[in-house]
Image (spheres, rainbow, N blue to C red):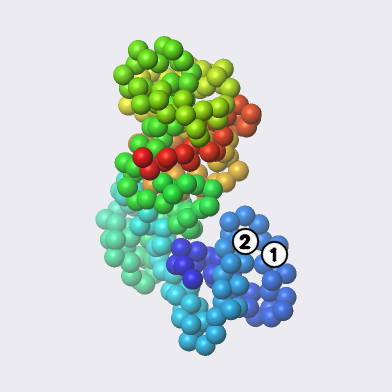
């Protein structure tokens, strides 16, 4: 039982009083929350004695905590932006949670926008890291690949694209980067002088793949420093409606992400 899904776990515990009807009721819940609740229910149903009690206790502790477990994967700049408005007591309430009613309210207000879980099967392993630089580098590779693809032979004149040129000529990227015209459009208003240029292009390419999964988008955004995360959020929202036939395949994003 993971402490990463306390809400789903709490629903599973609540459903136990329904007895044989619990599975049918939980099957009506959609999205990631429904999935978490059903997984937790099955885990609890197959745990007996002390092990079952331990799992239920862990879920209850996580559910009652003033701050969610996902706080540790959120970049501090997002929390700082909220507590700076709420005051010093809010900062203390988040850093050292207590059960004082005011502190609990402040801590929950400051962390209300955090995703309820620490994982999502849609994102590649890079999204599970707490190292924002690794995620930025991954996005940078995606953006560079798209820009090199869009420029074609002209990309050879751009030193920053030398590695990308070599990458896109081989599987699993070769033939999986979407239509060239769409890549050109994605890069049209982006300048290489912009520090976020590759990230912007990457998010435009990723947007349709994440459009239906708000949780995955939040996980990606909140693991990044707030200035970059705001850019990522903007581009993911602006290009969410792009047709899938105008985008790279998911295998091109997931390829060699850790290299």
- Between 195 and 141, the one lying in front of the other is 141
- Between 127 and 25, the one lying in front of the other is 127
- Between 128 and 118, the one lying in front of the other is 128
User: In this picture, is 78 found above or below 158?
Assistant: below
Q: Is disc 2 in contact with disc 1, using a CB cutoff of under 8 Å?
A: yes
Report the side of 171 relative to 69 (left or right). right
Under circle 2, the secondary element is helix
Mark 1 burial class by Cα count in 10 Å: few <14, some 14-19, many 20+: few
Residue drawn at (41%, 69%), measured in percent from left and top?
65
Mark 2–mark 1 Cα distance, whole angstroms, equals 7 Å
User: In this picture, is 151 found above or below 174?
Assistant: above
Residue drawn at (38%, 47%), measured in percent from left and top?
223
Residue at the spot of label 2 = 34
Image location (x, y in percent) of residue 48: 55, 85
Going from N to C along the chain, the mark reached first, 2 or 1, is: 1
The tag on residue 27 is: 1
Image location (x, y in percent) of residue 126: 41, 46
Residue drawn at (72%, 69%), measured in percent from left and top?
24
Report the side of 76 relative to 251 (left or right). left
């Amino acid at each position: 039982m993971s402490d990463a899904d306390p809400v789903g776990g709490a629903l599973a515990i609540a459903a136990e009083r329904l007895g044989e009807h619990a599975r049918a009721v939980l099957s009506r819940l959609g999205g990631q929350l429904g999935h978490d609740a059903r997984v937790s229910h099955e885990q609890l149903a197959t745990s007996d004695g002390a092990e079952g009690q331990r799992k239920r206790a862990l879920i209850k502790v996580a559910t009652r905590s003033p701050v969610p477990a996902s706080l540790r994967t959120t970049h501090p700049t997002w929390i700082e932006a909220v507590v700076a408005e709420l005051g010093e007591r809010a900062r203390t309430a988040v850093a050292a949670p207590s059960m004082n009613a005011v502190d609990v309210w402040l801590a929950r207000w400051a962390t209300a926008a955090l995703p309820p879980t620490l994982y999502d099967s849609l994102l590649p392993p890079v999204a599970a890291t707490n190292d924002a630089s690794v995620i930025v580098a991954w996005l940078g590779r995606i953006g560079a690949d798209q820009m090199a693809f869009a420029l074609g032979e002209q990309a050879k004149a751009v030193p920053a694209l030398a590695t990308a040129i070599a990458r896109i000529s081989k599987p699993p990227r070769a033939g999986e980067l979407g239509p060239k015209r769409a890549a050109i459009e994605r890069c049209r208003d982006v300048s290489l002088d912009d520090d976020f240029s590759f990230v912007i292009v990457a998010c435009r390419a990723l947007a349709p793949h994440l459009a239906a999964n708000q949780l995955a988008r939040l996980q990606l955004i909140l693991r990044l420093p707030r200035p970059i995360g705001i850019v990522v959020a903007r581009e993911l929202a602006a290009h969410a409606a792009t047709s899938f036939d105008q985008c790279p395949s998911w295998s091109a994003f997931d390829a060699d992400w850790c290299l």
